[in-house]
Amino acid sequence: MSSDQPRDSITDTSDPLTSTRDARMGDGVDDRFNSRLREAFGSTPFILTKFDKFMNWVRGSSMFMLQFGIACCSIEMMHTYSVKHDLDRFHAGVPRASPRQADVMIVPGTIVSKFAPRMKRVYDQMPEPKFVVNMGNCSTSGGPFQEGYNVVKGAEEVIPVDIHIPGCPPRPEALVYGVAKLQERIANGESSPVTVKPYELEEFGDLERDEIVDKLAADIDEESLVMRYNWADSP
Amino acid sequence: MSTQQEDDTPDVDDAAPATPASGSPAALEALIEDHVLEREDHLNAPGFVIRADAVQDVLSTLKTEAGFDHLSCVTAEEHEDRFESIYHLRKYDDPTQEVSIIVPTSRDNPVSETAEPVFRTADWHEREAYDLVGVEYDDHPNLERILLPDTWQGHPLGLDYNQNKPQIVTFDEHKNPLEGHEQAADDSDTMFLNIGPHHPATHGVLHVETVLDGEQVADVNPDIGYLHRCEEQMAQKGTYRHQIMPYPDRWDYGPGGILNEWAYARTAEDLADIDVPEYAQILRTMGGELCRIACHMLALGTFCLDIYGDFTAIFMYAMRDREVVQNILEDLTGQRMMLNYLRLGGVVWDIPEPRAEFFESVRDFLDELPERLDEYSDLITSNEIFQARTVNTGVLDYETAKDYGVTGPVARGSGVDYDVRRDDPYGYYPELDWDVVTEDGGDNYSRLLVRMEEVEQSARIIEQCVDLLEGWPEDERDIQANVPRTLKPEAGTETYRTVEGAKGELGVYIRADGTEKPGRFKIRSPCFSNLSALKEMSTGEYIPDLVATLGSLDVILGEVDR
Ligand code: SF4
């Protein structure tokens, strides 16, 4: 119907609006509560499911991302959030500025020695259950900068990671795919792999004493949190 | 026509009309004669080796008497027998007039005098030199590490650095790093506030340590290095011909792709004496300006994100327009962001077939652009609320801008009429018709205006390039000069060349050591210098204005930290 023709409802009838409702209901029982979900479960008004399963489904379908820009990949991440790619269509589009309101963290960029303790802290501040998506080669392995003296060889050295998305940078489509994969996994109740985390925040006093600890002993408080990088053991 | 610059030879400077004698290397040498140990010319400029205790003397003489008012970059490097700091000086009025001041120091005691009292910008540059190479500067106000954590051991770009040694990095949560500094101590009413490194307003991982007096900023100190990805080390590990070119894309990922690559290409082509065919120059120019538009759109979108607070319409509009640019760039280069399009001596490939289709998509974009820009003007610049937030906030005056080595849209917003594209011409820019945009306000508003007008100018340039490319005879489409497979510039040749990146003067210094990899590769990042002026712009203002100022500076942390 072209828009230059007035619609019937405007010109023709002045009946009260109930008539349309009647028309919609048709004869018999009002089926307006019959959602697709209801159909899926048959005629019974009860859904029998495990609470865990239900929660997993909910979790996967309503994700709050952490607004977390690190490097070049975050530009593509911004594109994924905004028009055209619009991650919101996949139940994951509202970036939260505070880690305490977020449950998925996309790590979009190179992690360097100075930043890793901060990232660990941001991760710790997120409430459980939480998930991590690695975006790009840098956060997977250090990417093009892997041989750098200051670059942590992947976010997995510091925090557990659920999904890796390769690319430098991955296209927005790839990020959307990665997030969809994560949702699938969550809905299936799969948890992230237990990873070995070589770099932890520790109190300086707890470190094993060796050459470098002795050297820094005068400058660093016993109780200061520190992260110790054993570059020689890095992958 | 050779598009390579002829002004490399220092002696053409003799012809400088205003102060004829002062331009020539001989005249310069006479000026600072007492301190000069020897001449050591670079390809781009005459170089003078001076004594380590005469740095301030020499630089201030050159600044006041010869007009070298722009300390573009400080390069430090370690040789087998000495440390060296190189001060790359030029003039804001005419950047083709350059001089390098080389300060050697012994290896056992690498101490030289600081240049900070003469040029404020030397503050950060020297801190970086200390951090990465290990040269120490006498009388420097705050000689601390700038990119690496304070507890780092060793200087990574030094010769005997062992990368496999463990390192310990501290995490001091709420410690006030300014404690004990005068500004905070004598006024007990102040409050310390950490902004970042994970904060939506800092555009990446910048950490701003602020001291507040009520709602006013009493002191501010940008703490950088959260994205220091060893770009210089990476470049020093790569071969000239192919392995370095992908890295510049990742300096300014705005995406300044082609603009950044050009900085490397220009320097390396200068070093290896390569001529670029005219057709390739046009392709470079067009691609570069497309990148500039994308960068400025990002700057505009995120700036409004800072001011209006959420993912609102303007941000989305800017992103929409960037998508179009990125599509064009993808057609041209094959990637959306990390373009890797330039090669030494040209570009990697020609316009994709069918050419007509490509040109049409560019023209479509250009045709729509004026309307889009009007829309932005309605939404942003003529919006009263926006004006209230940005006019007269974050003011950076003309002299301070120069003192801090500020360049690009930030400098032009403060009335500094300086654009490397025009003043030290390269590429196809001199043949085209376009203007350099300046504003006199020096505030956040002016900087935004400059960016928006520059988008128009870039569009003008692109349009002319498209016309030229379309009419170019088919058998003269040379996209690459003949460049040998391996490049081994002669040992000891040094050069420092700059281009106008999206954020300002982007420079690369290379010293060849006779192998196929650079001996020293130093990046002069415009954002780095621009950000160092933040303190001048924000002290005494309200904290929301600090956030606006950060936004209008348009820093890309990848480029600041490298
Ligand atoms: S993977 Fe590539 S694009 Fe992403 S942060 Fe690393 S270098 Fe940048």
Image (tube, helix red, strand yellow):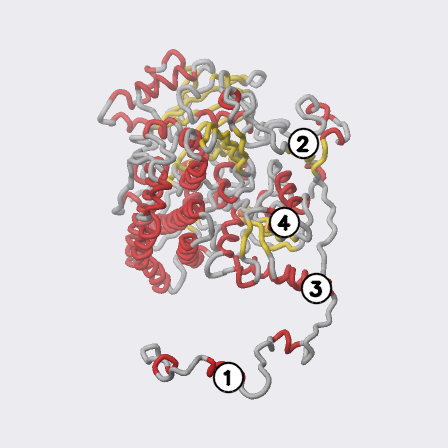
Residue position marked by numbered label 1 in the rendering: A22
Q: Nearer the viewer, residue B338 or B351?
A: B338
Q: Nearer the viewer, residue B385 or B189?
A: B189
What chain does mark 2 sit on? B
Q: Residue furthest top?
A: B34
Q: Position of residue B497 (x, y in %)?
A: 40, 35
Image side of residue B15 versus residue B496, left or right: left
Q: Regarding mark 2 in the picture, which secondary structure is present there?
A: strand
Q: Earlier in the sequence, mark 4 or mark 3?
A: 4
Amino acid type, mark 1: Asp
Report the disc number at residue B168.
2
Judge depth for marks 1 and 4 and give the one in front: 1
Amino acid type, mark 4: Thr
Q: Earlier in the sequence, mark 1 or mark 4?
A: 1
Alpha carbon of mark 1 to alpha carbon of mark 4: how far? 58 Å
What chain does mark 1 sit on? A
Residue B347 visible: yes
Q: Regarding mark 1 in the picture, which secondary structure is present there?
A: helix
Q: Is the shortest distance between ligand 1 and the CB of mark 4 under 8 Å?
A: yes
Residue density around tag 1, few if under 14, some if 14–19, many if 20 or more, within 10 Å: few
Alpha carbon of mark 2 to alpha carbon of mark 3: how far? 40 Å
Report the disc number at residue A159.
none
Alpha carbon of mark 1 to alpha carbon of mark 2: how far? 74 Å
What chain does mark 3 sit on? A
**Quadrant position of the N terminus of chain B in the picture:** top left
Alpha carbon of mark 4 to alpha carbon of mark 2: how far? 22 Å
Residue position marked by numbered label 4 in the rendering: A140
Residue density around tag 2, few if under 14, some if 14–19, many if 20 or more, within 10 Å: many
Q: Position of residue B476 (x, y in %)?
A: 33, 55
Q: Regarding mark 3 in the picture, which secondary structure is present there?
A: loop
